[in-house]
Image (tube, rainbow, N blue to C red):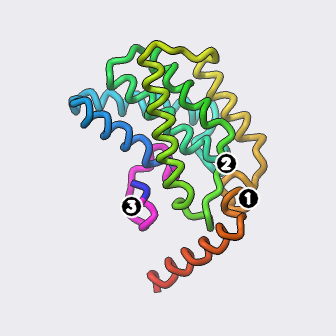
C-alpha cells in the first residue's frame, strides 16, 4: 500500500495516506492465516470505520494536526479493534485492543522526508502493525488496559495539539531535519520532478 502511494498511485487512505498500510496488512494477513471469511473481514472493516470516526471526532486523524500518532497510531488502533472483532472478540476486548495499541503510539511525530509520505512512513506502518498485533493478542488473552479507550483517544488529541509544529508533518523537524534526511528528500524530489518532465 505504501509503495503504491509513494509511486503516486491510487490508494484507499484508511485513515490517511501516511497510515494506509496498517489496516490492510493486519486484516488481510490475519484473514489468510486464520481462514477468516470475507463476511467477518467486512465486519472488521465496519468496526475500523467506526473507531476512525471516534478518533476523528475526539482527536484527529491528521499528521498536520496531531503528528504520526494521529495517522499511523490511529490506523494501528483501527486495525487492532477491527481484527479483534474479526477474530471473535467481545466489544470490551475491541476497546481494550484499541487502547492497548494507541497508548503505544502516543507522542509519535510526523516527520516525512521532504514532506513526502514515504520515509519514514513505510517503516512506521510496519511498526504500527506490530504494535496492533500485540494489542490484539493482549486483548484476546483477556488483558485489559487501565485507561478507557475514549480517554486514550482524548490524550492523543491533547498531545497532538501541544506538539511543536516541527513535528506535525512539516518536514521541519525529526528525521526530516537530519542531514541525511534533507539529502534524501532533495534526491527524491529531483527524481519526481524528472519523471514529471
Q: CA distance from mark 2 to mark 1?
A: 9 Å
> Label 3: which residue?
4
Question: Can I make out residue 52 in this image?
Answer: no
Q: Which is more toward the observer, 112 or 12? A: 112
Q: Residues within 10 Å of mark 2 (few under 14, many from 20)?
A: many
* Quadrant of residue 1 within the rendered picture: bottom left
Q: How many residues crowd around disc 1 within 10 Å: few (fewer than 14), some, or many (20 or more)?
A: many
Which label's residue is closer to the chain start, 3 or 2? 3
Q: Position of residue 47 (x, y in %)?
A: 40, 28
The residue at 45%/20% (across/down) is: 94
* Closer-to-camera residue (56/114): 114
Q: Which residue is mark 1?
A: 173
Give the Cα distance between marks 3 and 2: 23 Å
Regarding mark 1 in the picture, which secondary structure is present there?
loop
- In the depicted structure, whether residue 16 falls above or below residue 58: below
- Residue at 78% of width from left, 41% of height from top? 162
Q: Residues within 10 Å of mark 3 (few under 14, many from 20)?
A: few
> Which residue carries the number 2 mark?
109
Amino acid at each position: 500500500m505504501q509503495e503504491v502511494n509513494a509511486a503516486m498511485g491510487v490508494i484507499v487512505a484508511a485513515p490517511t495516506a501516511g497510515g494506509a498500510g496498517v489496516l490492510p496488512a493486519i486484516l488481510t494477513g490475519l484473514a489468510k492465516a486464520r481462514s477468516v471469511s470475507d463476511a467477518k473481514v467486512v465486519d472488521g472493516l465496519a468496526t475500523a470505520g467506526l473507531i476512525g470516526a471516534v478518533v476523528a471526532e475526539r482527536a484527529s486523524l491528521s499528521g498536520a494536526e496531531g503528528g504520526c500518532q494521529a495517522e499511523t497510531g490511529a490506523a494501528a488502533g483501527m486495525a487492532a479493534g477491527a481484527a479483534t472483532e474479526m477474530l471473535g472478540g467481545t466489544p470490551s476486548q475491541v476497546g481494550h485492543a484499541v487502547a492497548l495499541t494507541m497508548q503505544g503510539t502516543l507522542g509519535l511525530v510526523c516527520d516525512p522526508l521532504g514532506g513526502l509520505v514515504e520515509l519514514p512512513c513505510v517503516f512506521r506502518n510496519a511498526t504500527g502493525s506490530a504494535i496492533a498485533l500485540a494489542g490484539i493478542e493482549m486483548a484476546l488473552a483477556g488483558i485489559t488496559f487501565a485507561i478507557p479507550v475514549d480517554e486514550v483517544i482524548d490524550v492523543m488529541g491533547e498531545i497532538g495539539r501541544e506538539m511543536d509544529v516541527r513535528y506535525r508533518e512539516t518536514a521541519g523537524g525529526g528525521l526530516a531535519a537530519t542531514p541525511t534526511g534533507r539529502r534524501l528528500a532533495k534526491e527524491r524530489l529531483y527524481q519526481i520532478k524528472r519523471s514529471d518532465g
